[in-house]
Image (cartoon, helix red, strand yellow):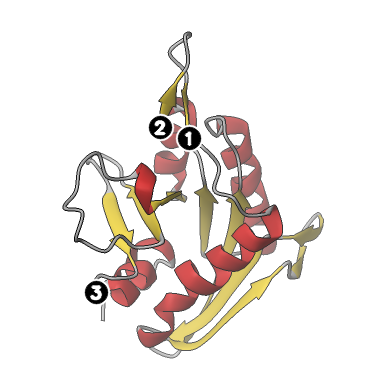
Amino acid sequence: MIESDRGIVRYPCPEITPGEFEQFVAGELLGAAGAAVDDLVVAVHEKVVGADGVYDFDATVRYRFAGMAFLVVVEAKLHRNPIKRQLVQVLHQKLHSVGAHKGVMVATSSYQAGAIEFATAHGIALVTVTEGRFVFTTRNAATACPTFVAHYHRAGSRGLVLSADDEDYADCVATFLLARPSP
């Protein structure tokens, strides 16, 4: 995290392309839920027909749980500056147009307060993904650090840190990001 002279917090972008980031979000982050739900299908740049047009989402997640089919729409933002409320509002509008069950925004930067407030009010999951070296202030040099760590922003709390190294990673992704109902 880098703070500018104006007090604005910025995160250094990982050294990947936007397309690689979308693939990471789809495969590594969301694809991990396959162990916790049935018939998981994660697609990158799926075009979904909505009530007012066709939308190309950075990723879509389709799965079945307890005999019901679910659709989660995902936007991946490889940004340095904090994510603004307007981007979350656009995702919310698209979510309703296509009849999705959940919206998820995954970014490499933080979120402005208005974005968090709007997402909380409308049930949109916000996730910040950073390279492990940006997460730890201090750590044991012998401790292996995961390549990426995801921070899930939860209303009324400090949030949740998700790491592929965690035993319950698949369940956490399914529950918090894909809105899988409790079994």
Which mark's residue is nearer the viewer, 1 or 3? 1
Mark 2 sits on what residue?
1
| Between 79 and 65, the one nearer to me in the picture | 79
| Cα distance between the residues tagged 1 and 3 | 27 Å
| Cα distance between the residues tagged 2 and 1 | 5 Å
Could you tell which of marks 2 and 1 lies nearer the N-terminus? 2
135 w.r.t. 97: above or below? above
Mark 1 sits on what residue?
11
| Between 168 and 154, the one nearer to me in the picture | 168
Is residue 72 visible from the viewing direction of this image? Answer: no
Mark 3 sits on what residue?
168
**Mark 3 in CB contact with mark 2 (< 8 angstroms):** no
Is residue 101 visible from the viewing direction of this image? Answer: yes
What is the total number of numbered labels drawn onto the structure image? Answer: 3
137 relative position to 133: left or right: left
Residue at the outermost left position: 140
Image coordinates of residue 172 in percent, x first then y, are: 30, 68
Where, quadrant-wise, is the C terminus in this rendering? bottom left
Tell me the kind of residue under disc 2.
Answer: Met
Q: Residue at x 22, y 76 (%)?
A: 167
The quadrant in which residue 89 appears is top right
Tell me the kind of residue under disc 1.
Answer: Tyr
Q: Secondary structure at mark 2?
A: loop
Image coordinates of residue 67 in percent, x first then y, are: 44, 90
Q: Secondary structure at mark 1?
A: loop
**Mark 2 in CB contact with mark 1 (< 8 angstroms):** yes
Q: Residue at x 59, y 47 (%)?
A: 92
Q: Residue at x 43, y 13 (%)?
A: 7
Could you tell which of marks 3 and 2 lies nearer the N-terminus? 2
Image coordinates of residue 131 in percent, x first then y, are: 43, 51
Give the class, few, some or many, for how many residues have Cα within 10 Å of label 2's Cα (few <14, many ≥20). Answer: few
